[in-house]
Structure formats: structure tokens, C-alpha cells
């Protein structure tokens, strides 16, 4: 009898854990409108490239939209944001690493990191999963007109589940932009090494996304609504660009620059889209917390607490 009970219990627990893995459903991006015969996968001579970056709107209508990225962040025109978002990635499951993605226009690792709560520019908190990170050199965003040697994009995508409805998440993606500046003798980043090591498998299995943020002494960021900076330029990105550049050695920077060796596709070894118009968008400025000290304000919990107090008051009055 006890055995049957345990058998049923284990089946239920297994079913629940399997359900959690299989029901994860990423909030999809809006369908882009492509010109005939061109798609995001068509990078190269017959499709899009950094040589024709001023004409992407001819290939995909969205690329000519008014909420495009990257932008020049003019710091004197920013507005102070009241929240202090917490960046504290929960650990990956042991043995689940990042795999190198075969992208001809960037170096990219794909692999799901665990969830992170992020506030969008309207102040609402949503849950995202870290999905991949990739490189641009030089930077795509500029701060007061200044380019940096390299910019990493950490791409997070919202999920649909019992707790979150995709229709309510305004930006399906949240991307963190981290700047890097060349410092000849800076220590090399372990996480970058497998990209350029011919003996490596291309997998990174001991990488902690928190590491980059914990190296910043100033965690000031700029926050605005924008787009993907590659085709199809979907205008559904909650952008968070960090101000303080991290150091990168001359040798590691050169490895990224040398990757862009095709001068037809990458004029002067660049894979950064030109700066786009701000078109009246507001840029918020804030400071993130990188140690697990303060929680992000939870809008729904505050509402629930208010409702609970209201019901309690009614009961007490009666
Ligand atoms: Zn990018």
C-alpha cells in the first residue's frame, strides 16, 4: 500500500517537473514584414550586411521604424529612474553550458540561464530568461557621442506560463548592453577563450553572468525602448545600457576584430549598426544593484497587499 502511494507520488512529482520543462513557452516577437526573398538568415552578399546597413529598411519594413536601436545616449537629456533593479542571475543547472551558435555576423553563445526579474521603461516587472550573449565591435550604442571598443549584448526573452501572460509583457526581449575598453594588460576573460581556441569544443560550462556586473564599481545604466540591431529590427526590446566600460586586453579585442575579416561584409571590421534617431523617446537613468540585497518593487504584490488590507478593513468594520 505504502509502495503504491510512493509510486503515485513519484509519478506526480515527475509529471510536474517534466511539465515545468516542457511548458516553457517563449513570448514570440511580432512578425516582421520582409521584402521578397530576404530573411534574417540571409546574411551575406545576397542579403543584409554591415555594408548595406543604411538600407535595411528596403529589406525589412520594421528597420525603418521610429523606435530603432542603437542610439546615442545623451546623458544630459536623461531622466532619473526611481527604481533600483537587482541583477542577480540564479545559477544554471550543473552541466548545462552555453554552446557556440554558428552566426556569420557575430560571436554568440546560446544556452538558457535561469530567470531574472526585469522592470521595463513603464515600471512594470516581468520575468525573463537569459538566452544568449553576443558581441559587437566597436560598440553599437554611444554615450555622449563616444564609441567603446566592444559591446556585449545579454539577450533575455520573456516566457509565458501560469504566472505570466505574453500579451501583458510589452517588450518580449530585455537586452543588457555592456561596454568594454581596451587596456593592453587586462586579464583575459575565461568565458571568451573557447571562441578562439581551436582545441575547445565551443562550450562554456562554468560561466556566471553575474561575474561581468560584479566587476563594475559604478552600475549606472540607461534604459529605453528600442529594437533589435540586426534584421528583422523588431521594436520590442527593453534596453538597459551600462555606462562603465570593463577592461579588455589588446589580444582578446584583436581576436574579435579578426573574426570580422571579410572586408565586403564588414567594412573596416565593424559589426555595429549605425546610430538611429531617438525620435522623442525618453531615456531613463538609474543604478542597478548587483548583490542580492534589495528586491525589485513588485507591482502585483503591492496591489495584492492593498486588496488584502481593504478586505480586512471591511471585515473588521462589520
Ligand atoms: Zn546585439
Image (cartoon, grey):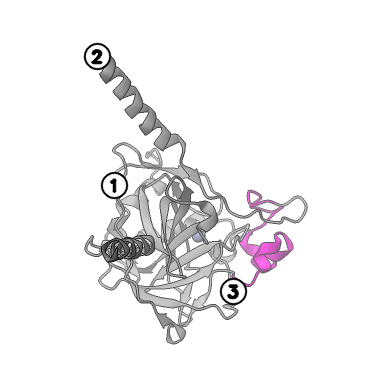
Looking at the image, is mark 2 or mark 1 earlier in the sequence?
2
Percent x, y for residue 58? 74, 63
Q: Is the C-beta separation of discs 1 and 3 under 8 Å?
A: no
The magenta stretch is 39-67
Q: Nearer the viewer, mark 1 or mark 3?
A: 1
Above or below 13: residue 79: below
Q: Mark 2 sits on what residue?
A: 3
In the rendered structure, does residue 65 fall within the stretch colored magenta?
Answer: yes
Image spot of residue 318 (x, y percent): 29, 63
The answer to whether the beta carbon of the residue marked 2 is less than 8 Å from any atom of ligand 1 is no
- Few, some or many C-alpha atoms within 10 Å of disc 1 (few <14, some 14-19, many ≥20)? few
Q: Quadrant of the N terminus?
A: top left
Say whether disc 1 or disc 3 marks the residue closer to the N-terminus.
1
Tell me the number on the disc at residue 276.
3
Looking at the image, which residue sits at the far top? Answer: 1
Please tell me whether mark 2 or mark 1 is closer to you in this view.
2
In the rendered view, does 247 fall on the left or right side of 141? left
Tell me which label, 2 or 3, sits earlier in the chain.
2
State whether label 3 is within 8 Å of ligand 1.
no
Q: Nearer the viewer, residue 128 or 93?
A: 128
The answer to whether residue 168 is visible is yes
The front one of 114 and 109 is 114
Which is in the foreground here, disc 2 or disc 3? 2
Above-or-below relation of 212 to 11: below
CA distance for labels 1 and 3:
36 Å
Residue wearing tag 1: 91
Secondary structure beneath label 3: loop
213 and 152: which one is in front?
A: 213
Q: Is residue 257 visible?
A: no
Q: Secondary structure at mark 1?
A: loop
Say whether mark 1 is within 8 Å of ligand 1. Answer: no
Amino acid at each position: 500500500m505504502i509502495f503504491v502511494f510512493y509510486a503515485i507520488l513519484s509519478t506526480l512529482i515527475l509529471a510536474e517537473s517534466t511539465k515545468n520543462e516542457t511548458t516553457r513557452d517563449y513570448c514570440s516577437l511580432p512578425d516582421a514584414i520582409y521584402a521578397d526573398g530576404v530573411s534574417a538568415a540571409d546574411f551575406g552578399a545576397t542579403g543584409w550586411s554591415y555594408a548595406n546597413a543604411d538600407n535595411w529598411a528596403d529589406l525589412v519594413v520594421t528597420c525603418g521604424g521610429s523606435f530603432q536601436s542603437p542610439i546615442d545616449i545623451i546623458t544630459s537629456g536623461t531622466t532619473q529612474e526611481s527604481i533600483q533593479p537587482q541583477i542577480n542571475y540564479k545559477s544554471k543547472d550543473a552541466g548545462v553550458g552555453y554552446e557556440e551558435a554558428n552566426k556569420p555576423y557575430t560571436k554568440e553563445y546560446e544556452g538558457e540561464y535561469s530567470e531574472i526579474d526585469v522592470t521595463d521603461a513603464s515600471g512594470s516587472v516581468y520575468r525573463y530568461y537569459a538566452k544568449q550573449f553576443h558581441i559587437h565591435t566597436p560598440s553599437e550604442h554611444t554615450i555622449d557621442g563616444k564609441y567603446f571598443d566592444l559591446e556585449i549584448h545579454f539577450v533575455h526573452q520573456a516566457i509565458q506560463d501560469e504566472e505570466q501572460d505574453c500579451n501583458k509583457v510589452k517588450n518580449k526581449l530585455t537586452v543588457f548592453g555592456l561596454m568594454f575598453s581596451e587596456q593592453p594588460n587586462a586579464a583575459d576573460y575565461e568565458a571568451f577563450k573557447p571562441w578562439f581556441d581551436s582545441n575547445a569544443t565551443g562550450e562554456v560550462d562554468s560561466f556566471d553572468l553575474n561575474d561581468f556586473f560584479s566587476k563594475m564599481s559604478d552600475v549606472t545604466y540607461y534604459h529605453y525602448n528600442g529594437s533589435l540591431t540586426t534584421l528583422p529590427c523588431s521594436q520590442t526590446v527593453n534596453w538597459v545600457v551600462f555606462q562603465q566600460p570593463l577592461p579588455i586586453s589588446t589580444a582578446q579585442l584583436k581576436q574579435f576584430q579578426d573574426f570580422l575579416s571579410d572586408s565586403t561584409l564588414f567594412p573596416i571590421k565593424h559589426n555595429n549598426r549605425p546610430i538611429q534617431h531617438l525620435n522623442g523617446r525618453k531615456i531613463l537613468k538609474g543604478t542597478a544593484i548587483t548583490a542580492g540585497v534589495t528586491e525589485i518593487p513588485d507591482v502585483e504584490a503591492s496591489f495584492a497587499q492593498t486588496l488584502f488590507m481593504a478586505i480586512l478593513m471591511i471585515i473588521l468594520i462589520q
